[in-house]
Amino acid sequence: MLVDLYATPNAAVPFLILLAVGAWTDLRSRRVPNLLSATVAVGGLAWSVAAHQWQVALIGLVCGVGVIVLLWVPWSRGGIGGGDVKLAAAAAVWIGYQQLLAYLLSGAAIGGLVALGAYFASKQDARAEIRNNMFLAVILKAWPSAPQARGGRVSVPYALAILGGGAYVIAAPSLGWPT
């Protein structure tokens, strides 16, 4: 029988610590180290293999690749950083398919809140540019530009949302929240 390895305390604690380190480095420098993402992915695989659940490890790899495919277009157009994509995929390796949708949706919702915070932390001219990009995206169905943090624009530390999504799928079942 396959079990949710990340939901056990022995696996959940290191998983959340690694994601918290990613969130901290992203907040501090707007970078997520490749070594950290690799550690998260390998940790998830190692935990699965240690429990003699090769199927879970394989499914986790498929989930990680699926997240990369899902985030490829936003990354290629500058909408999300490469480190964020790698960390999100690495977390998906650990989370697996049963909670993948809850992880992605909760991470997206939390990411929206983080982006709102970055919007309000940006200077007035930058907020006007962000509103213009939103207009292009929503009304004109055009993909807006996503410039680097400049001119008072605060970039979004998306690793916070990845941490939030990971924490949600771990905490939700015990709190009776939907997953």
Image (cartoon, helix red, strand yellow):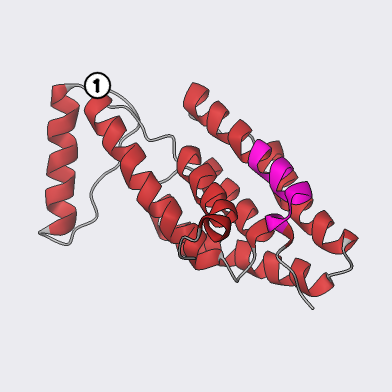
Q: Which residue is more in the foreground, 17 or 150? A: 17
Please tell me whether mark 1 sits on a helix, a strand or a loop: loop
Q: Position of residue 133 (x, y in %)?
A: 18, 45
Q: What residue is rendered at 48% in x and 63% in y? A: 102
**Residue, far bottom:** 1
Question: Height in image: 21 above or below 77?
Answer: above
Residue 37 occupies which quadrant of the picture? top right
**Residue 14 in view, yes or no:** yes
**Residue 77 in view, yes or no:** no
Q: What residue type is labelled 1?
A: Gly
Crowd class of label 1 (few under 14; some 14 to 19; many from 20; radius 10 Å): few
Majority secondary structure of the magenta segment?
Answer: helix
Question: Height in image: 56 above or below 147?
Answer: below
Q: Which residue is more in the foreground, 100 or 152? A: 100
Q: What residue is rendered at 54% in x and 43% in y? A: 163
Q: Which residue is more in the foreground, 20 or 172? A: 172
**Boundaries of the magenta span:** 6-17
Q: Where is residue 142 in the image (x, y as percent from the top left)?
A: 19, 58
Residue 93 occupies which quadrant of the picture? bottom right
Q: What residue is rendered at 89% in x and 59% in y? A: 50
Q: Where is residue 20 in the image (x, y as percent from the top left)?
A: 59, 35
Residue 56 occupies which quadrant of the picture? bottom right
Q: Give the mark count.
A: 1
- Which residue is labeled 1 in the image? 151
Q: Is residue 84 magenta?
A: no
Q: Is residue 149 left or right of residue 138?
A: right
Q: Position of residue 55 (x, y in %)?
A: 78, 75
Q: In this view, does 134 lie to the left or right of 37?
A: left
The quadrant the N terminus occupies is bottom right
Q: What residue is rendered at 19% in x and 55% in y? A: 137
Q: Is residue 65 left or right of residue 122?
A: right
